Image (spheres, rainbow, N blue to C red):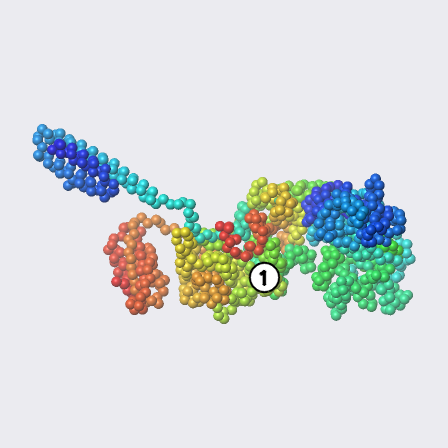
Amino acid sequence: MRIPLSWLRDFVDPQLAVDDLAELITNAGLEVTAVDHLGVAGAPFEWDRELVRVAHVLEVQQHPEADRLVIATVDYGGPAPKQVITGAPNLFEFIGKGDISALALLSPIVLEGGTYLDHYKNAKPTKLKAKKLRGIMNDAMLCSPVELGLGEEHDGILLAPAADWRHTGEAPEAGTALADVLGDSVIEIDIIPNIARCASILGVAREVAALTERELTPPSFEVKAEGPSFEGALKITTEHPELNPRFVAILVEGVEQRPSPLWMQHRLQLCGQRSINAVVDVSNYVMLEMGQPNHAFDWDFLRERADAYAGPEEPVHLITRLGRSEESLTTLDDAEHKIPQDTILVTDPAGNLSVGGIMGGRNSEIQGNTTTVLLEAAAWNFINIRKSARVLGLNTEASFRFSRGVHPSQAKLGALRAAELLRLHASGTISQGVVDYQPLVTELASIELSTGYVNRRSGLELDARTIARCLQRLEFEVVVLDDDRLEVTAPDHRLDVEGPHDLLEEVCRMVGYANIPETVLADSLPPQRGNPAIEVEERIQDLLAAAGFQETISYRLTTPEAEANTRVGPQCAAGPYVTLSNPSTLDRAVMRQSLLASVLDAARSNLKNADHLSLFEIGHIYIEDGGSAFGENLPSERLRLALILSGPSRTGGWDRPVGEPYDFFDLKGIVERLLASLHVDGVVFETAEHPSFRPGRTASLRIGDQSGELGHLGELHPTVVEQLALRTENPVLAADLDLEVLIAATQTSFKIDPVPLYPAIREDLALLVDSGTPESTVQEALEAAGKPLLSQVELFDVYTDDKLGGKKSLAYHLTFRAANKTLKDKDVGKLRRRILSILEKQIGATLRS
Amino acid sequence: MLQELDTIQVAATEALTNATDAEALEEWYRATLGRKGNVQQLSRRFGEVSAEERPLFGKRVNEIKTALQQAFDERSAAVKREHIEGLIAADALDVTLPGRQPRRGALHPSTLVLRRMTRIFGDMGFQVYRSPDVVTDEYNFEWLNMPPEHPARDMQDTFYTTQENVLLRTHTSAGQVMAMREYHPEPIRVILPGMCYRNEQITARSEIQFHQIEGLAVGTDITFADLKGTLTEFARRFFGRDRETRFRASYFPFTEPSAEMDVSCMLCDGAGCKLCKNTGWLEILGCGMVHPVVLRHGGYDPDVYTGFAFGSGPERIAMLRYGIEDIRYFWGNDHRFLEQYS
Ligand SMILES: [Zn+2]
């Protein structure tokens, strides 16, 4: 909503500089998003107060040397009239008319040295220089709107009767600075839903008056009704009073179709509205001024139809009703709309006329030859209007206001105001008798408020009188019942007041949020529960970042196809997807089911400019299985951890090459290290299959005796690498883990082994086993057989050779240690023989000689 | 014999100066003071010395032994020192050559900001409450005092799912009623971080997903003044103790009174600059007193309980803090952006 300051001043004088005013209302909830200046200080194009003035045109003569130029004699407030050469076509009609000063035509003039916007040079600010025009010296310029930044128009100079320049009708003296007449500052306010009442100049003026404690002077709603009586000429029926509680109509006859006065056009333009003609302009003006949208029907059109459906003696019958099936209407904007069934229409027995509160119909609108206008100002249900406007896709100034709520009390005032302006500016004659049909009266909200209510919630200590005063400033009626209680009635322009909490807000706004103290929470502290899961999650993040991994956060919206692309073969998704019914783009259509797919997407984009990758992400996946604790139709959301590792294992440098590419065991080591740091014991890695990973290089992770799978780890399947077009020659290692299982298995308290008191004996042992035997089987067998003295088993070599005849050699460093004595070689020798014999029996292992 | 002793001493002392490495020193020692060295050999010829000369001879032998041993020790130390000095001189590095970089990892900037916020609020007794991304209309709108067709629904373009009544939360406020229902009638102090979604055009300023962090305090004696005090303290801890805050009236359907909290611009200190669009203030969070309708849906009697709530966007704060100009960086996952946080 754009608020020209000059217009606001019609109703209240804030006695504040515009920036201070902007700050004041911003703090009170009317957020000022911009302050624009026109012609005055601060404007991008400022009108010099001396050199840009209003001039009175006295006479117009033909230029003796040029057919297309005239010489205008003007009074510009100087010691003597000045002759100005111009080509303005709108002066040509005055050539040879002699002294036309009585017409009191004013035009803006730029004097020598003043600046105008050169229309022929892209509105470049240009200093006016005196120069000869076809032999005659010229040192001033009468300007078109475009040359002063006043609009688009450049068909002629801005020329208007003196009485049209100010809304009061007061004529500016010749020589008045243009800035004092048309200069202005415009405050732009973001109309959020709770300040619908401020979607008008008057609405903002009310707030300003309340905040500055200055008097509000609303516009006059008096009308001079001099026409014949309108009694009995119009009948109204509202089929749904709850959707259309009030319908006001006034007839204005003898309306002339002409432009509206300059001041009105100017104000509309400042508000961002184009001027059409006096009838349309008045309608828009009243809507902007007081927030009541209104509509003008061509009365003769309505009458003609009534002649047909009822007879010449019968009244015009307007009916508001809901749309019927298959009904359509062509609106003012020439678009044909299929009318939804719960949209309210203004109709007559012959058909529909307009979409109530949203837009008029093409057929009943004011035509070029219309002289009798039926002004309608009605009240509509805001929810209904909101729905209709959305379904119809019609966002109009009227629907903007009605869908946020306009109090029914405003309807009659709006009709009266519009009628009077039509009388004044379109020569209309107002018929006597206003049709005011109000089938449902909207009661003013009445609320009991206590000082305790206000003070307990605000932290203030206000007495009843102070609270009353705050509310009275906003035109609430307040009766102070006693020291503690107040009876408050909302003013008739407010629909947003429902209970004491609304009054609390108004009191706080009037006190000023800045004047409310700042205190420390004194309320009792709730039980502190701690959040171990989140602590573990943060620790995992830290461990991985310390291990060189970069955290990513991906879009959680994707497509099933994009996720399928990270898999090989026919394996389908984990379950139904959470699917958007209104995706913004086709590639963000469902909630992800694979965190691995998210990280792989990040890998793909990063591989375009890097050969090394170490990424991790923690985030949810979503499966439409009704597994939520918060509602049976909600999906389950599982927290997962995905890791990616690829590229050279060490950065190169000036003295050494990059390292070998990472392989399976690098990522496995990192995962093992992570598990160890979290004290997750007994994780079993087993050969497994996974649709994203390369067979033979895939492991599943399971936590010992728990049935829950921790996830998978492996090298990306070559086909997946190809499907994703990953730009790398190196293996891509990835892990996809269930973070909830991992967190649950994490031990935050664990036992510490004592520091050994006695020295250890270390020995190496090389074993031959069948080449198909998993190493972990050998390791486990060693550990079991060596108990309790074998304290550490460390594989240091794996050797395969055809000469070994289907066997492989595994070599271990074994550490033997006793808790209570220094071991002797013979103790270890005995144990070693026992281990060998057990391993031979259990897994067919033999000592490699 | 005595003369021979003197000759040996002179020759040995001379030879010692020529021993320049450990090997030569060892050789010298063997030849001079060793068991088969000439000093030892000469001293064994004690019997050949006349009786009256014997005391003097013995004394001289000892003197020479001591003197040569001392000379040897000094020479050894000198050789060792020269050797180390030689090594140092030969192995000097160009210390201006670049160091070898370990792989660096880092947390995402949103994580960094979320953590700082949760830590500060944690100190004030606000605990993290996790709530889901996919919620019902009731949690996101209706129970937050936004019935169907409420004008405030227009402020948030919502992603709906094909399940009736199910949508992607447009704000973390959707978790308010969840927390209330879980904890009532106990007092509440929680923060709810999480991802939110809005069906908007993706531009440098707006995204279809973004984090929010919601705060909620419910009790029997919580005031708007407490809200101001708590959030101002947060702002000072987060942005610096010299920051000013400004609370201005605003609108959220689920709070009343509602406010926006601005923090004085850290770049221009309130004087006005490009970052703060010349206002001197940066919009940091929205807040207000919990609306009675919301309290009621959460199971709290609004005549007895009061509370406040607030919500803020970590990405927006990260943008202010790190001077990030484009919100699309956040989910772009470009390592060249992310690794700068390490
Ligand atoms: Zn600034």
Ligand 1 located in image quadrant: top right
Which picture quadrant has residue A327? bottom right
Q: How many marks?
A: 1
Q: Position of residue A553 (x, y in %)?
A: 53, 56
Left or right of A316 on screen, residue A800: left
Left or right of B194 on screen, residue A395: right
Disc 1 residue type (three-letter):
Gly
Q: Residue furthest top?
A: B52
Q: Is residue B126 visible?
A: no
Which picture quadrant has residue B91? top left
Residue at image position (74%, 47%) is A116
Q: Is residue A441 above or below residue A58?
A: below
Nearer the observer, A360 or A367: A367
Residue at image position (73%, 50%) is A118
At numbered mark 1, what does the secondary structure look like: helix, strand or loop?
loop
Q: Position of residue A514 (x, y in %)?
A: 66, 42
Of the 4 image quadrants, the one containing the C terminus of chain A is: bottom left
Residue at image position (20%, 35%) is B13
Nearer the observer, B337 or B28: B28
Which residue corresponds to mark 1? A631
Left or right of B155 on screen, residue A687: left
Q: Is residue A807 above or below residue A474?
A: below
Nearer the observer, B262 or A833: B262
Q: Position of residue A782 (x, y in %)?
A: 32, 60
Left or right of B60 on screen, residue A410: right
Q: Is residue B272 visible?
A: yes
- Chain letter behind tag 1: A
Nearer the observer, A765 or A103: A103
Q: Position of residue A457 (x, y in %)?
A: 65, 46
